[in-house]
Image: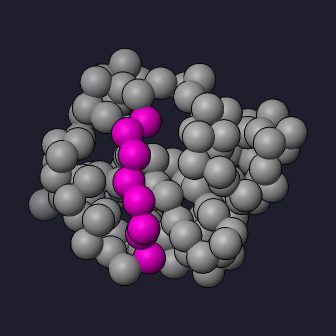
């Protein structure tokens, strides 16, 4: 079984998120998604429209997602890879090179982002209406 792991906030879910999850899951047999907790997001200066629990509920309902775990800090990634027997770490190419340190533990892939969509763009569009 090939296990894949990705991370994100997944607030205001959009087709770019779904494409990331679909492409990530297509790389293996099992997809674990680490979702940033509200506390962790506050530390990054992010305020979400949906709570952590709501975002987890949404992700668990998506057929590509097999497991959801909390992301509580920047340093947990190596432990997550080890504890969940991850073979492939996947993240958007806007993070290119940032997670190369995981290559000692698993394969690291930076997938191209879906063009013309981001949560920031959705929030900006909604605030201009």
Identify whether 63 is placed above or below 128: below
Residue 75 image point, x, y percent: 59, 23
- Please, which colouring scheme is shown? one colour
Q: Would you say 32 lies left or right of 88 here?
A: left
Q: In which quarter of the image is the N terminus?
A: bottom right
Identify whether 44 is placed above or below 122: above
Q: Nearer the viewer, residue 59 or 91?
A: 59
Q: Would you say 109 lies left or right of 42 here?
A: right
Q: Quadrant of the C terminus?
A: bottom left
Whether residue 115 appears in this view of the structure is no
* In magenta stretch: residue 33: no
Residue range in magenta is 64-71
Q: Would you say 54 lies left or right of 21 here?
A: left
Q: How many marks?
A: 0
Residue 120 image point, x, y percent: 37, 50
Residue 10 image point, x, y percent: 36, 54
Which residue is rendered at x = 44% and y = 76% of the image?
A: 64
Q: In terms of image quadrants, where is residue 18? A: bottom left
Q: Which of 9 and 62 is in front in this view?
A: 62
Identify whether 98 is placed above or below 57: above
* In magenta stretch: residue 69: yes
Residue found at the very far left of the displayed protein: 129
Residue found at the very far top of the displayed protein: 43
Q: Main secondary structure of the magenta part?
A: strand
Q: In terms of image quadrants, where is residue 93? A: bottom right
Which residue is rendered at x = 32% and y = 75% of the image?
A: 62
Which residue is rendered at x = 37% and y = 39% of the image?
A: 70
Q: Which of 15 and 56 is in front in this view?
A: 56
Which residue is rendered at x = 66% and y = 40% of the image?
A: 82
Whether residue 63 appears in this view of the structure is yes
């Amino acid at each position: 079984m090939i296990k894949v792991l990705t991370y994100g906030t997944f607030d205001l879910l959009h087709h770019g998120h779904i494409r990331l999850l679909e492409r990530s899951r297509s790389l293996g047999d099992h997809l674990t998604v680490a979702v940033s907790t509200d506390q962790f997001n506050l530390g990054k200066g992010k305020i979400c429209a949906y709570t952590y629990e709501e975002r987890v509920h949404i992700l668990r309902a998506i057929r590509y997602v097999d497991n959801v775990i909390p992301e509580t800090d920047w340093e947990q990634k190596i432990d997550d890879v080890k504890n969940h027997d991850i073979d492939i770490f996947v993240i958007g190419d806007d993070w290119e090179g940032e997670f190369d340190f995981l290559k000692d533990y698993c394969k690291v892939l930076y997938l191209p982002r879906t063009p013309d969509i981001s949560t920031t763009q959705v929030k900006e569009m909604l605030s201009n209406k």
